Image: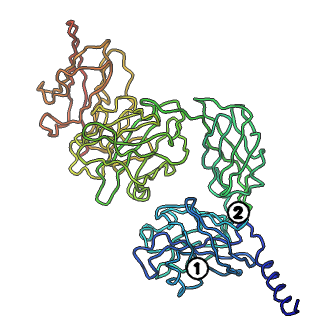
């Protein structure tokens, strides 16, 4: 063999050996993503993903892969990505468009990037996941730019562990910086300890602990970091889940049981930057299938302000732990068939007794326009059933299509003196009383911003427990929609079925001013509501009023009750 040819072969061999080394996690990162190029701010109307080498070594990108879990693009061209350098990966059709901005490469099968959220994987030829990015509209940290035309850029490429807070919309005038250092480039050091967010349950012996950021997988596998009360104690094993490593599968030494809420306590857990947490805890439970009225529709905004969004709130009035992944929201068509069925949560999400959850199409808008005390209990769905402004139907279903709760609402249930109903939520007064009782609904109080998503309703009233009598509460009420004693609740309980009731309000002169019920067939217990208006829907003057309730059955049993109330108004 000639010496020159020998040296050439050796050169090729050595070059391949240098560039074929195995990459470690985070050696190369996806540091810029362009999911929604429309409308253009100056960049080509084509999606791209930018790679950056943040290591001290060069890597040959031949046979590397980018995937969204549904489609995978494989780099079929050898390319040496040097330290602190970039490469734009895009569809073949867009490669020429991006070359004027910096190094770019077109690939076949480039994954279609979802505008409102996706998960992207970068894998080496050895099948190792080098970087994973999950993004959504919140990642832009800018409501206007999230609508399109701007790329998502990583702030600190030396700190890819930080996750969502390390991304924001590009500040470049043309919408992004393909092939160049990011416009938002800066120091975003991770100095915050990981936090345990929640758990979900696989079975009675297996739960999953969910954290807010990737963990040090070796540290997170030590069972001594985890403890569960009610005699469960430490798990038998702790297995961090790749590729994100923000979830840990815990195998328990004894079964958890239904209708019991446990506490999982974690301490000493480290993230991939080395920050360790102090003890924090979340609830654990074994979920059951929700049945009739276990979960109830508790609040609904069906007539939002212009450019606004509907929302529905659900309340867990049962003793069960329910998985929101097993609940669906729907409506009905003109002949009563279910339509527009949407799953409340795509992931397992436990709904504990006494909690509230809200679904909407835009969490950001809801938090900007209403007080949201528990933002973690907001669920953003891509779409909701249509809820007309006049009247409509909301149906809550389980996986068996069993109706858990159903509301046929009407805008006439609003507080009568409200001039403009848009932007005002309709609230359930008592979650223990029938959903379809119009007297069990009223407008959210003005003092609470006309809505109470994720927390107790402004007009909540559990009602007295009656024993065969008529009671009126409060004794003094002021119908001004301020969230405090806005109506008078006339609650009844009759000894058996078959009773009929008549309820009339009289003023101090003995004149009948309001007919609340006329030959109404009565359940064994229930209530009626008086809003301080007369039969002509006019305001009554302040003063003392007598509410006379007469009940009778077909056997001739009769009874009459008189209750005195005072109507007050603010001066």
Which residue: 50% across, 42% down? 324
- Residue 119 relative to residue 225: left or right: left
Q: Position of residue 164 (x, y in %)?
A: 58, 63
Taking depth in this image into account, of 84 and 335 the one nearest to the observer is 335
Residue 228 found in image quarter: top right
> Which residue is label 1 attached to?
105
Label 1: state its secondary structure: strand
Front in this rendered view, residue 196 or 278? 196
Question: Percent position (x, y) of residue 74?
Answer: 62, 69
Mark 2 burial class by Cα count in 10 Å: few <14, some 14-19, many 20+: few
Q: Residue 370, percent across and down? A: 39, 53
Tags 1 and 2 touching, CB below 8 Å: no
Quarter of the figure that contains the N terminus = bottom right
Q: Which residue is mark 2?
A: 127
State left or right for residue 191 relative to residue 493.
Answer: right
Residue occupying the far front of the picture: 1
Give me the residue at 12% from left, 26% from top.
512
Left or right position of 524 against 148: left
| Residue at 66% in and 81% down | 85
Determine the secondary structure under disc 2. loop
């Amino acid at each position: 063999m000639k010496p020159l040819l020998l040296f050439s072969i050796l050169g090729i061999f050595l070059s391949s050996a240098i560039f074929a080394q195995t990459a470690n996690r985070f050696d190369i990162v996806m540091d810029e993503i362009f999911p929604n190029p429309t409308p253009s701010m100056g960049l080509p109307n084509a999606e791209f993903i930018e790679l950056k080498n943040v290591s001290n070594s060069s890597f040959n990108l031949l046979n590397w892969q980018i995937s969204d879990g549904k489609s995978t693009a494989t780099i079929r061209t050898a390319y040496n990505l040097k330290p602190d350098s970039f490469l734009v990966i895009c569809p073949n059709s867009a490669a020429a468009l991006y070359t004027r901005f910096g190094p770019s490469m077109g690939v076949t099968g480039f994954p279609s990037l979802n505008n409102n959220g996706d998960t992207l994987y970068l894998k080496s030829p050895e099948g190792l996941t080098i970087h994973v990015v999950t993004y959504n509209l919140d990642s832009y940290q800018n409501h206007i730019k999230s609508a399109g035309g701007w790329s998502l850029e990583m702030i600190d490429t030396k700190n890819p562990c930080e996750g969502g807070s390390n991304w924001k919309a590009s500040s470049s005038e043309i919408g992004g910086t393909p092939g160049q250092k990011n416009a938002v480039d800066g120091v975003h050091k991770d100095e915050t300890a990981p936090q345990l967010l929640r758990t979900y349950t696989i079975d009675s012996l297996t739960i999953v602990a969910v954290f807010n950021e990737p963990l040090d997988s070796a540290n997170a596998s030590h069972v001594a970091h985890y403890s569960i009360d009610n005699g469960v104690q430490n798990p038998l094993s702790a297995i961090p889940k790749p590729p994100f490593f923000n979830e840990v599968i815990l195998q328990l030494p004894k079964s958890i049981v239904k209708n019991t809420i446990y506490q999982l306590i974690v301490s000493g857990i480290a993230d991939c930057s080395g920050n360790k947490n102090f003890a924090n805890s979340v609830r654990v439970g074994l979920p059951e299938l929700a049945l009739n009225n276990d979960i109830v529709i508790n609040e609904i905004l069906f007539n939002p302000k212009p450019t606004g969004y509907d929302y529905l709130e659900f309340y867990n009035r049962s003793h069960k732990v329910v998985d929101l992944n097993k609940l669906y929201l729907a409506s009905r068509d003109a002949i009563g068939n279910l339509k527009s069925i949407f799953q409340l949560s795509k992931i397992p999400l436990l709904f504990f007794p006494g909690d509230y959850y809200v679904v909407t199409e835009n969490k950001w808008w809801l938090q900007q326009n209403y007080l949201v005390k528990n933002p973690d209990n907001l669920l953003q769905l891509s779409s909701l059933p249509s809820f007309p402004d006049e009247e409509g139907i909301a149906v809550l279903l389980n996986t068996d299509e069993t109706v858990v709760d159903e509301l046929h609402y009407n805008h006439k249930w609003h507080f009568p003196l409200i001039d403009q109903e848009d932007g005002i939520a309709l609230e359930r007064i008592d979650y223990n009383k029938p959903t379809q009782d119009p007297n069990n609904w009223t407008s959210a109080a003005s003092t609470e911003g006309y809505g109470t998503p994720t927390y107790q309703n402004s007009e909540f009233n559990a009602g007295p427990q009656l024993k065969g009598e008529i009671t009126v509460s409060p004794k003094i009420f002021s119908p001004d929609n301020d969230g405090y004693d806005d109506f008078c609740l006339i609650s009844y309980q009759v000894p058996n079925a078959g009773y009929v009731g008549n309820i009339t309000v009289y003023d101090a002169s003995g004149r009948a001013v309001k007919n609340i019920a006329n030959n109404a067939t009565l359940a064994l217990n229930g209530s009626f509501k008086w809003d301080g208006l007369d039969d002509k829907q006019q305001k009554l003057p302040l003063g003392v009023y007598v509410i006379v309730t007469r009940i009778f059955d077909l056997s001739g049993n009769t009874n009459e009750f008189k209750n005195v109330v005072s109507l007050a108004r603010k001066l």
